[in-house]
Amino acid sequence: MKKKKTTIIAEIGCNHNGKYQLAIKHIDAAIKSGATAVKFQIFDPKNLVAKNTLKAPYALKTTKMYKDQLSMQKKIMFKFDFFLKLKKYCKKKNIDFLCSAFDLDSLDYLNKIGLKTFKIPSGEINNIPYLHQVKSYKKKIILSTGMANLDEINSALKILRKSLPLNKISLLHCVSIYPTDEKNINLKSIQFLKDKFKCNVGLSDHTSSLIVPALAVISGAKIIEKHFTLNKNWLGPDHSMSLNPSEFKIMVKNIKTAEVSLGTYQKILTKKELSLKKHARKSIIAKTKINKGELFTKKNLTIKRPGTGIEPKKIFSLIGKKSKKNFKEDDLIKF
């Protein structure tokens, strides 16, 4: 993760629809779209969800062919061996590989293949055995906070911080509504979480907006995570709320504009701005002809461009004094 640059995660998740080559195509498209990392989801369906568990409301429209969560998860799952191949492919393509695990066996597998950063999904924030296991690896952690109140976030961090320093833990502000309306995203939570927990904070964004991630960067986010798909019309739980490659590119461009626009915490005058002063600012000017020895008054002095003479703030100190030379109308007053 480059210093001062936003980590931009293309959340491919399960948008590969269980097909390895489709996952590869997503990685390639994410790279072209400007992502700095890609993220997948790993789970064993039988360890993830009980039989006859209902699907989330947002998934009902695009997964009608599956009667419940278990049948849907079985269809979109990946074999564990695929994740090692994807990790190696990402290394070859010079993009960070991330993966969210949804059960303990999946966590253990990710650790065995050498994952450097563990992304804890929002649904596991109160899963105490899960948190204890992931902290034991002593790797970097990104913790999503969707559906979590302050007490739950604090409790999770207490467990993680027993083994990890602050600089190895990042929080993601997240609103677990799919999709999230812009009026509910509450970007002020980013600075609030930074102040409250003294660690890096990012945004896991489920809005359809291409500008909200840039606004999050302005608000202090160091990580942006956004769902990514090759086709928003494909069947599956997340495709419709994901960004396609062209949308993702625009989002990345907006983020980079935000980064450049932020600057530093001080008031700085650029060289170009300084060079404009003589054209845009004003000086004390002779309003009428002024003879040597004549007193300067409000009637014979005025303030006009250019800004190459005496500054306007000194006009009151001039009034009542004698002119030491002759001035024509519109001459700069000089000594």
Image: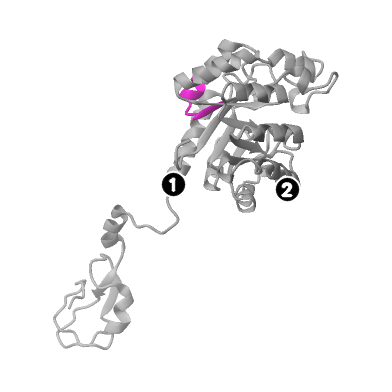
Image quadrant of residue 171? top right
Q: Residue at x 29, y 61 (%)?
A: 277
**Location of residue 180 with respect to 311 vertically, above or below:** above
> What is the span of residues highlighted in magenta in the rendered image?
28-38
x then y, percent, for residue 181? 68, 38
Q: Which residue is mark 1?
A: 261
Q: Quadrant of residue 244?
A: top right
Give residue 334's quadrant in the image.
bottom left
Q: Looking at the image, which residue is at 51% across and 25% down?
A: 246
Per the image, the residue denoted by label 2 is 150
Residue 23 highlighted magenta (yes or no): no
Q: Say which quadrant the C terminus sits in.
A: bottom left
Going by the numbered disc 1, the residue's amino acid type is: Ser
Q: Is residue 33 magenta?
A: yes
Q: Position of residue 14 (x, y in %)?
A: 65, 20
Q: Decide if residue 13 is on the left or right side of residue 314.
A: right
Compare marks 2 and 1 and give the one earlier in the sequence. 2
Give above or below for 66 relative to 157. Answer: above
Location of residue 15 in the rendering, given as x and y in whole percent from the top left corner: 63, 19
Give the amino acid type for the residue marked by disc 2 in the picture.
Leu
Instruction: Give neighbour class at mark 2: few <14, some 14-19, many 20+ (Cα, 10 Å).
Output: few
Q: How many marks?
A: 2
Whole-Å distance between the Cαs marked 2 and 1?
32 Å
